[in-house]
Image (cartoon, grey):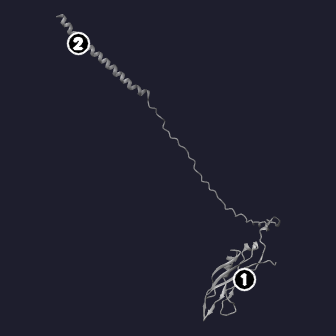
Amino acid sequence: MTHTITQSTAQPLAKIALITAAGLIMTFVAFAFMQYLIKPQENYAPTVQPDFTIEVAQEKKIKQITTISRLPPPPMVNKAPPKLMPVSDAPEIDTTQIIPLIKISPQMSDKEGLTSLKLDNQASPIVRMAPKYPQSAARDGIEGWVQIGFSISKTGRVINPTILASEPKRIFDAAALKAIKKWKYKAKIEQGHAIEQHGLNIQLDFSLDNSN
């Protein structure tokens, strides 16, 4: 009986001791946790910055007004006349290229295909233009002649002039043709009507007059 009573008494005591120890541990843990929560607030207390305002005084811009006065126009300056080149400084003229003046007198001989100019109803020249002497031929002292065949229209105008012969060849041809195209003839009249004339020819001689 005594042994049974001792065991039943010891079990409640052990439970009380265990509960007390657990309570102490939880109390310690809770206290430590509270200390942990309180410590950061003490170490990192917010800093209070002073409340003040800095005023910066701005300088007022001063507008500067500049008065510009119009200057009078500059006086007129008369330009000096250009200096004339002295006669001694003038460039010399090369006279070696100047062609001497030659008196040209083309001769015209009447070798027309008409029996004569004595009949009134025959064609007779009214206007004759002397041919212009070619400059190259005059410079080289070349002389020659040109035979031209032509017809006369009803109005007396020279038509269809052609070169029949010339000496030297082609030197005076153009000048002779140009001249005879300006000639004017009196038209031939038959039975009261003007008719064309064909088969006429004339020789123009080109010669230089060197008498001077």
Q: Earlier in the sequence, mark 1 or mark 2?
A: 2
- Residue occupying image coordinates x 73% and y 73%: 137
Kindly identify which numbered label has been placed on residue 12.
Answer: 2
Q: Residue furthest bottom?
A: 191
Q: Residue furthest left?
A: 1
40 or 187: nearer the eye? Answer: 187
| Amino acid type indicated by mark 2 | Pro
Image spot of residue 134 (x, y percent): 71, 75
Image spot of residue 47 (x, y percent): 46, 32
State which quarter of the image contains the C terminus.
bottom right
Task: Give the vertical position of 120 relative to 206 (above or below).
Answer: below
Q: Is residue 115 left or right of residue 85?
A: left
In the rendered structure, are the residues bearing label 1 and label 2 in contact, judged by CB atoms less than 8 Å apart?
A: no
Secondary structure beneath dot 1 equals strand
Secondary structure beneath dot 2 equals helix
Q: Is residue 129 left or right of residue 44?
A: right
Q: Residues within 10 Å of mark 1 (few under 14, many from 20)?
A: some
144 or 10: nearer the eye? Answer: 144
165 or 83: nearer the eye? Answer: 165
Q: Is residue 100 left or right of residue 44?
A: right
The total of numbered circles placed on residues is: 2
Q: Residues within 10 Å of mark 2 (few under 14, many from 20)?
A: few
- Residue occupying image coordinates x 69% and y 77%: 166
Q: Which residue is mark 1?
A: 108
- Residue occupying image coordinates x 82% and y 67%: 87
- Residue occupying image coordinates x 41% and y 27%: 40
